[in-house]
Image: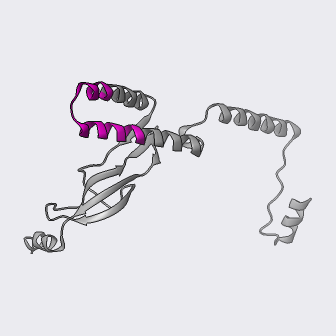
């Protein structure tokens, strides 16, 4: 009744005619809706996964990445090599399950990348904006980004960028 009244308040040209479905069509539609509800609860795609699950996956992947970096910086003792193998095996298992951790150190930076820049620092040793340190990696689950990377970007100093441009004049 309420829907009819809302339509009646509109101009005749704007009114939407009520759909005419038979009882059989209504029954088929309700069955399809029921099937869709059941299938969506069973076969949930990664992009529709709950935020808490993806957040937990991203935190676990980030912690694993940080542990691998610390171990690499610590040196090459027998214990470190064994721990490194365990961490590598864990990372490979997560990658096989669709979880990919992407580090950005040393890559060129442009404003279109899905990254959060924490700091821009002037560096006379670079000719273009370059990521010098990844503070937090980007994490992807089945090709869907679940965590944006956080980086520090080095950019050429102002006097060097003018020197580079002078050669093209």
User: In terms of depth relative to the viewer, which is nearer, 53 or 109?
Assistant: 53
Quadrant of residue 160 within the rendered picture: bottom left
Q: Is residue 102 magenta?
A: no
Which one is in front, 151 or 29? 151
Looking at the image, residue 131 lies above or below residue 155: above
State how many labels appear. 0
Residue shown at 46%/38% (left/top)?
60
Residue 101 spot, x, y in % from top left:
38, 40
The residue shown at (36%, 61%) is 118
Q: Which residues are magenta?
A: 62-84
Magenta segment main secondary structure:
helix
Identity of the residue drawn at 79% across and 34% down: 31
Please give left or right for residue 38 compared with residue 98 in the image. Answer: right
How are the residues colored?
Answer: one colour
Relative height, residue 3 to residue 97 (above, below): below
Point out the image quarter for the N terminus.
Answer: bottom right
Is residue 19 left or right of 158 when viewed as pictured? Answer: right
In this view, the residue farthest toward the right is 1
Task: Using the image as rendered, state which of residue 72 and residue 13 is in the foreground.
Answer: 72
The question of residue 66 being in magenta is answered with yes
Percent x, y of residue 36: 70, 36
Residue 63: where, in percent of width, then height? Answer: 41, 40
Is 59 placed above or below 87 here? below
In this view, 163 is above or below 47: below
Q: Is residue 79 left or right of residue 1?
A: left
Coordinates of residue 168 in the picture (x, y in percent): 9, 71
Look at the image and tell me in which quarter the C terminus lies. Answer: bottom left
């Amino acid at each position: 009744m309420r829907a009819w009244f809302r339509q009646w308040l509109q101009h005749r040209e704007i009114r939407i005619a009520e759909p005419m479905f038979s009882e059989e069509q209504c029954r088929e539609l309700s069955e399809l809706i029921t099937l869709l509800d059941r299938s969506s609860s069973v076969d949930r795609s990664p992009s529709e996964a709950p935020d808490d699950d993806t957040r937990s996956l991203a935190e676990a992947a980030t912690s694993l990445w940080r542990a691998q970096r610390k171990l690499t910086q610590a040196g090459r003792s027998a214990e470190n090599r064994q721990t490194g193998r365990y961490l590598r095996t864990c990372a490979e298992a997560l990658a096989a399950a669709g979880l990919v951790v992407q580090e950005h150190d040393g890559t060129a930076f442009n404003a279109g990348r899905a990254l959060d820049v924490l700091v821009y620092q002037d560096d006379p040793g670079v000719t273009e904006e370059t990521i010098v340190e990844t503070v937090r990696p980007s994490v992807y689950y089945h090709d869907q980004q679940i965590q944006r990377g956080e980086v520090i970007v080095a950019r050429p100093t102002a006097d060097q960028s003018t020197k580079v441009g002078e050669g093209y004049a």
